[in-house]
Image (cartoon, rainbow, N blue to C red):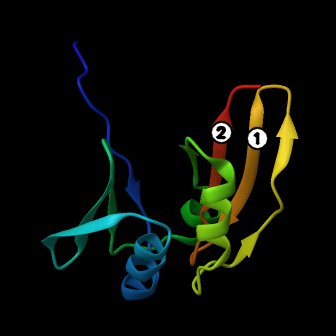
Amino acid sequence: MDVVDIKVFVPSKDYEISKAFYSEIGFESEFVSEDLTLFQNGDCLFFLQHFFNEDLANNFMLQVCVSDIDTAYSLCSQSKHKTKITPVQSESWGKVFYLWGPVGELLHITELGG
């Protein structure tokens, strides 16, 4: 098997709110169908699906690697649709803050490096 790409399908409970959330934090949307939207930032893409399962949503995590954690934090902290955000933390491998989306999905916003 020669894998050339992987895209995740992110759940949503209120599809419109989830679409607004990902737009607020810097992703551009592209209509795919009534129940599926493709989001992109640079070369990174994922699908937002109009599907909700509470167990899945509460255990869903994404690591989003960024080039500038302070710029990312500033943008994400302004989101009207986030449910929670932590301060930026320094770790041995880089910096991170945690951002929870509208259905409880957890985004690890990460700047790798020292």
Q: Do the residues labelled 2 and 1 touch (CB within 8 Å)?
A: yes
Q: Residue at x 44, y 78 (%)?
A: 18
Picture layout, residue 25 above or below residue 61: below
Instruction: Give the residue furthest to the top.
Output: 1
For mark 2, what is the residue?
A: 111
Which picture quadrant has residue 65? top right
Q: Which residue is drawn at 27% across and 69% down?
A: 29
Q: Residue at x 58, y 55 (%)?
A: 60
Tell me the kind of residue under disc 1: Lys
Residue 47, label in figure: none
For mark 1, what is the residue?
A: 95
User: Residue 40 location in percent, x, y?
Assistant: 31, 55
Picture layout, residue 79 above or below residue 99: below
Q: Which residue is drawn at 44% across and 70% down?
A: 22
User: Residue 78 location in percent, x, y?
Assistant: 63, 79
Along the line of sight, the residue nearer the viewer: 62 or 53:
62
Q: Is residue 19 left or right of residue 73?
A: left
Picture layout, residue 74 above or below residue 42: below
Dot 2 lies on which element?
strand
User: Residue 23 location in percent, x, y?
Assistant: 40, 73
Q: Is residue 54 left or right of residue 47?
A: right
- Mark 2 crowd level (few <14, some 14–19, many ≥20, 10 Å Cα): many
Which picture quadrant has residue 39? bottom left
Tell me the kind of residue under disc 2: Glu
User: Residue 55 location in percent, x, y?
Assistant: 60, 64
Q: Is residue 82 left or right of residue 27?
A: right
